[in-house]
Image (tube, grey):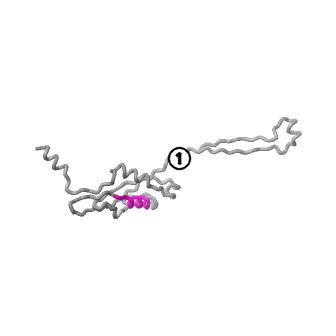
Amino acid sequence: MEDINKQKKAKRFLEQPQYPGGKKALRDFIKAHLQYPEDAMKQRIEGVVTVAYQVSDMGVVENPVVIKGLSPSCNEEALRLVKMLHYGQAHNRGVRLKSNYNINIQFKLAPATQKEVTVSYSVSSSSLSKKDASKNHVPQNFGYTLTIEK
């Protein structure tokens, strides 16, 4: 008796449109097409934008809305990405339906790498003449190389 109940529960009357390739493919698509806004990058803005949207039974994304925003430029980028999504069709025996989805799009900057800055300069002794400098064993020109790490 239990086996029959489990089989009946496994069937669903209505299907929801699925992203081709599943959740991993959806994450890969977002990573591949995300363009970090330049102003957000300069201001080092990081966080998550949550977008709610509907998907028709034909797999078309409709009515994307930012639920939780980050900055205007990040919100626009998240909406642009969601509008690019295409889901597979749902076959529901002629029943037309729209499915509701939410997606979190993460904006995360790469960790800042340490840059090595090299500064070179030369100092010459202008107060001593060449003769005086050679008598006193003072080098005429000498230089330093200075490395500064941040």
Work out which quarter of the rendered image holds the N terminus and state it: top left
Residue placed most toward the observer, 117 or 80: 80
- In the displayed orientation, state which residue is furthest to the left: 1
Q: Measured from the top left, where is residue 126 in percent x and y?
A: 83, 45
Residue placed most toward the observer, 103 or 34: 34
Q: Is residue 59 magenta?
A: no
Q: Measured from the top left, where is residue 112 in percent x and y?
A: 53, 47
Q: Measured from the top left, where is residue 100 in percent x and y?
A: 29, 59
In the image, taking residue 137 as reference, residue 20 lies left or right, namely left
What secondary structure is the magenta-colored segment mainly? helix
Dot 1: within a 10 Å radius of its alpha carbon, few (fewer than 14), some, or many (20 or more) residues?
few
Circle 1: residue type: Ala
- Residue interval drawn in magenta: 75-86
In the image, taking residue 52 as reference, residue 37 lies left or right, namely right
Q: Please identify the quarter of the rendering in which residue 127 is found.
A: top right
Q: Measured from the top left, where is residue 50 in percent x and y?
A: 37, 56
Where is mark 1, residue-wise?
112
In the image, taking residue 146 as reference, residue 24 lies left or right, namely left
Q: Residue at x 70, y 44 (%)?
A: 120
Q: Please identify the quarter of the rendering in which residue 81 is found.
A: bottom left
Q: Is residue 83 magenta?
A: yes
